[in-house]
Image (cartoon, grey):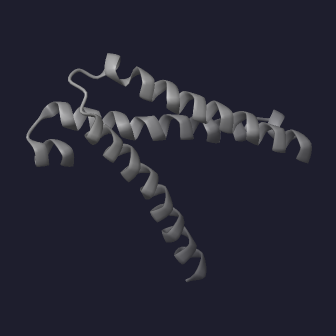
């Protein structure tokens, strides 16, 4: 919404939103994969599962970015990348907020 307000173009807002999705969807797949029963059998399978699901996450992210020009009409690459970067930084902000809650 911020991208749409700042630029006055709906294409920029959709591009930024798609950039956010390119972070959130692979991250959700990664988290879901790590919560599977296979990943909790032993330390070895947990470690293997981590690497497999990280590879899946990276692959889905790259595929989503490669498919962006075909999926988003009038794609604004800058808005998409800004949406992607801002979403990645929010993860760090959430981590910092969570640590402060544990301390207090």
Question: Residue 41 at x, y = what percent?
Answer: 89, 40
Q: Answer above or below: position of 86 versus 95.
A: above
The image quadrant where one finds the N terminus is top left
The x and y percentages for residue 4 are 15, 41
Give the quarter of the image for residue 64.
top left
**Picture quarter with the C terminus:** bottom right
Give the residue at the far left of this rendering.
8
Which residue is at the far bottom?
Answer: 104
Q: How many labels does the image show?
A: 0
The residue drawn where x is 48% and y is 70% is 97
Residue extending furthest toward the top = 70
Q: In which quarter of the image is residue 56?
A: top right
Task: Tell me which residue sits at (18%, 30%) in the image.
Answer: 11
Task: Please determine whether, in this image, residue 40 is positioned above or below residue 59.
Answer: below
- Locate residue 52, reporting x and y percent: 74, 34
Q: Can residue 81 be seen in this view?
A: yes
What residue is at 71 percent from the left and 40 percent from the top?
34
Looking at the image, residue 12 sits to the left or right of residue 52; the answer is: left
Q: Can residue 42 be seen? A: no
Q: Where is residue 57 in the image (x, y as percent from the top left)?
A: 60, 35
Q: For the point 43% across and 29% down, which residue is it?
A: 65
């Amino acid at each position: 919404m911020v991208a749409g307000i700042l630029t006055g173009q709906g294409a920029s807002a959709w591009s930024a939103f798609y950039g956010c999705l390119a972070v959130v969807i692979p991250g959700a797949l990664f988290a879901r994969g790590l919560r599977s029963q296979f990943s909790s059998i032993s330390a070895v399978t947990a470690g293997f599962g981590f690497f497999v699901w990280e590879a899946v996450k990276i692959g889905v992210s790259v595929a989503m970015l490669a498919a962006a020009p075909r999926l988003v009409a009038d794609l604004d690459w800058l808005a998409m990348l800004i949406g992607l970067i801002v979403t990645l930084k929010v993860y760090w902000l959430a981590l910092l907020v969570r640590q402060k809650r544990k301390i207090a």
